[in-house]
Image: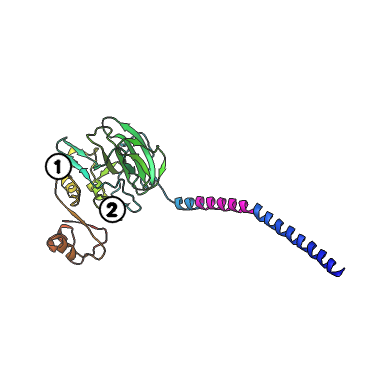
Amino acid sequence: MQPAFQKILFLISFSCLSALNLSAQDLLARQAPTDRHLRAVDSIALRQLRVKEASRNVDVTATDLYDTWNTSGVHVYKGVTLPESYKIDLRGFVMPTPSRNITSRYGYRSSFRRNHYGLDVKVYTGDSIASAWDGKVRVVKYDAGGWGKYVVVRHANGLETLYAHLSKQLVRENQDVKAGEIIGLGGNTGRSTGSHLHLECRLLGEPINPELLFDFPNQDMTGDYYVWHRSAARSPRRSVAQNMAEKQAEAENVLMAANTESVSETNMAEAPVQTRYHKVKRGETAYSIARELGVNVSQLLKQNGLNNRSKLRPGQLLKY
């Protein structure tokens, strides 16, 4: 009797343990989707928190410089008071296009007897055009007799960039965009004789030579910062006398990129002065730069308002 009783007791214990194990497995099975769901919710919340933290205290419309938001057109700053100078932060950029081929530079066009306030970069119809910095789209319009399909983006660093002759606009007005976000496709719309990107950079409506900011041959910026000065500004609103008086100052700001893939003979003829610029690299000195460029160090220092005691900064532009 005792062995039979022990056998029955063993069977009862085994059944209880099996039931308990199955119950635990059922509980875990029911919990698994819940855990995955909670992790997904936590992940979404974390991403939202990161986006919120990243956007906190970021002014994409540069309200320290602009007091209006007008989507009616490009030239909406008539009569605005310009600062004496303004430091533009060029960091956090993405090149608008990987193309290095500049087909027409900023400056006076003798053939048209007018100023060219942008830079023409060779792209093909359908090529992606990206926003250079984080910002907000101010204008998305079509100009049949000029820019064709174009987009204007205002950035937190105070600049407004204009992308023209697009075949397609991929953003809308008042839309926030990130640096590198595709805002349009290259094209040949408006007053254009071939597919290209017409790029303008403006500060409160005042045009800035894009080559003072963008180094297209090296797909880089000219430095971390660029200081804009009102005394060197040139605008369609300025008088002819003022423009003529400042022509020499503007000519010194024209970058002749030595490594440009191809520049037409017409564009070379239009360049006012063949002034070249060297971007200072970390560890370079005036003497090592002069030796590399094959110029006299004294002339290099004098041309840039420097002396033997002057310290060079990485990213600083030296003309020669």
- Give the residue pinned by disc 1: 270
Colouring chosen for the image of the structure: rainbow
Q: What is the distance, in whole Å, between disc 2 and disc 1 at their CAs?
A: 25 Å
Q: How many numbered circles are shown?
A: 2
User: In percent of the image, x 14 and y 48: which residue is there?
Assistant: 273
Would you say residue 67 is visible in this rendering?
A: no
Residue 220: numbered disc: 2
Q: Quadrant of the N terminus?
A: bottom right
What amino acid is labelled 2 in the image? Answer: Asp
Relative height, residue 108 to residue 260 (above, below): above
Q: Nearer the viewer, mark 2 or mark 1?
A: 2
Residue 201, horizontal then vertical, whole percent:
29, 44
Residues shaded magenta? 31-48
SS of the residue at dot 1?
Answer: helix
User: In percent of the image, x 42 and y 40: which residue is there?
Assistant: 175
User: In percent of the image, x 67 and y 56: which residue is there?
Assistant: 25
Characterize the local packing of mark 2: few (<14), some (14-19) or many (20 or more) Cα atoms within 10 angstroms: few
What's the magenta bit mostly, secondary-structure-wise? helix
> Within the image, what quadrant is residue 286 found in?
bottom left
Q: Quadrant of the C terminus?
A: bottom left
**Residue furthest to the bottom:** 2
Question: For this view, does 41 lie left or right of residue 192?
Answer: right
User: In percent of the image, x 18 and y 65: which residue is there?
Assistant: 288
Would you say residue 142 is visible in this rendering?
A: yes
Residue 182, horizontal then vertical, whole percent:
36, 43
Q: Reading the chain from its start, which is encountered first: label 2 or label 1?
A: 2
Residue 72, horizontal then vertical, whole percent:
36, 33
> Within the image, what quadrant is residue 195 found in?
top left
Residue 154, horizontal then vertical, whole percent:
36, 43
**Residue furthest to the right:** 1
SS of the residue at dot 2?
Answer: strand
What amino acid is labelled 1 in the image? Answer: Glu
